[in-house]
Image: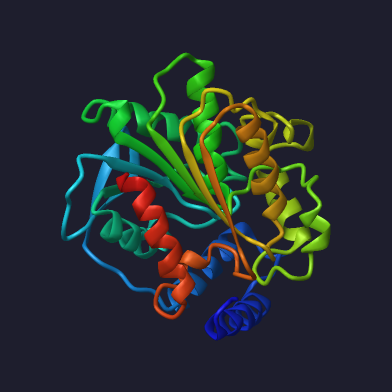
């Protein structure tokens, strides 16, 4: 059963999004609003952050106080492919790094609508190529939330298509995998998602790619062939609008022989793992993801 604090977080999120978010505002203003609201989320943080450049692209190392693995997590932040940055997600990732005792690197991939598909995918592949100069593929793990979860899986599909050696694992938090919005939860959870509304997600989808491309597997990994992809862990909420994406993809991956662990958490907000300063379920999820990383 969800904690009392999770109910509080739901109503706080609904109120803050309602007060700050205007879907008709300019993308520059929306980015500022998302950056501000992210700073208002009670979050814990740990370790240190170090900027690095990857062939002209800014990235951020998240280094825990205690590092016991020789692995690295290449993490892709969420934000509808249009907003957010490593800075908005660094605190959440610092807690993932802390519990997994593993370094993370977050990339500042190019955002839509100024840089639509395939820009983000290209940047993800560039970061992986750069990491491979130092880390063997079996030491690299992909991770991401929301659109970043979709980017992690689309990058895997791109690597598979080109015959590249894949990273060892991937984990996704509330991933956005179907920009065509065909799943049942886009209707059934339309009013139970405190964070994402249907109209906004349709706007973001066309910022990233034209509707004619929304079933392209590199835009929407739900439509790709997951055969041969590495072990996966996905955490999603029962009440979020993107729930169907995870359930349908997990079923498809399982049928293709992929080792996958899908957990559907009751009535959490979208990417509840950010709320580490107040929400017990945030740390519980992060600890499970950390165990997956370390295993």
The x, y position of residue 70, in whole percent, is 20, 40
Q: Position of residue 185 (x, y in %)?
A: 77, 56
* Image coordinates for residue 53, horizontal then vertical, percent: 27, 40
Seen at 56% across and 85% down, the residue is: 4
The C terminus lies in quadrant = top left
Residue at the (41%, 57%) spot, across then down: 288
| For residue 36, above or below residue 168 | below
Q: What residue is at 51 percent from the left and 48 percent from the top?
A: 172
Residue 220 appears anywhere in the view: no
**Front residue (pair 27, 201):** 201
Q: Quadrant of residue 195?
A: bottom right
Image position of 41 with respect to 256: above or below: below
Residue 80 visible here: yes
Of 21 and 42, nearer the camera is 42
Image side of residue 148 versus residue 289, left or right: right
Vertical relation: 106 (above or below) 16: above
Residue furthest top as drawn: 163
Which residue sits at x=72%, y=44%?
206
Q: Which quadrant, please, contains the N terminus?
A: bottom right
How many numbered marks have been drawn onto this rendered protein structure?
0
Q: Is residue 101 left or right of residue 165?
A: left
């Amino acid at each position: 059963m969800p904690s009392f604090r999770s109910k509080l977080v739901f109503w706080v999120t609904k109120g803050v999004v309602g007060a700050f978010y205007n879907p008709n505002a300019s993308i520059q203003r929306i980015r500022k609003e998302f950056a501000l609201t992210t700073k208002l989320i009670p979050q814990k943080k740990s370790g240190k952050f170090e900027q690095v450049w990857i062939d002209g692209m800014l990235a951020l190392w998240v280094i825990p106080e205690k590092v016991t693995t020789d692995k690295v997590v290449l993490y892709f932040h969420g934000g509808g492919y249009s907003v957010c940055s490593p800075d908005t997600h660094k605190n959440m990732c610092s807690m993932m790094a802390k519990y997994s005792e593993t370094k993370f690197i977050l990339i500042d991939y190019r955002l839509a609508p100024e840089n639509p598909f395939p820009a983000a995918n290209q940047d993800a592949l560039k970061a992986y190529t750069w990491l491979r100069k130092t880390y063997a593929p079996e030491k690299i793990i992909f991770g991401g939330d929301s659109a970043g979860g979709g980017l992690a899986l689309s990058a895997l599909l791109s690597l598979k298509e080109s015959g590249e050696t894949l990273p060892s694992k991937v984990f996704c938090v509330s991933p956005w995998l179907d920009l065509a919005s065909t799943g049942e939860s886009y209707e059934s959870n339309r009013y139970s998602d405190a964070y994402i509304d249907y109209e906004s997600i349709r706007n973001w989808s066309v910022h990233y790619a034209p509707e004619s491309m929304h079933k392209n597997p590199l835009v929407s990994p739900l439509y790709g062939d997951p055969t041969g992809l590495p072990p996966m862990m996905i955490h999603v909420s029962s009440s979020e609008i993107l729930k169907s994406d995870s359930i349908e993809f997990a079923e498809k991956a399982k049928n293709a022989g992929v080792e996958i662990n899908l957990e559907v958490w009751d009535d959490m907000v979208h990417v509840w793992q950010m709320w580490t300063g107040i929400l017990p379920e945030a740390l519980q999820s992060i600890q499970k993801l950390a165990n997956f990383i370390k295993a």
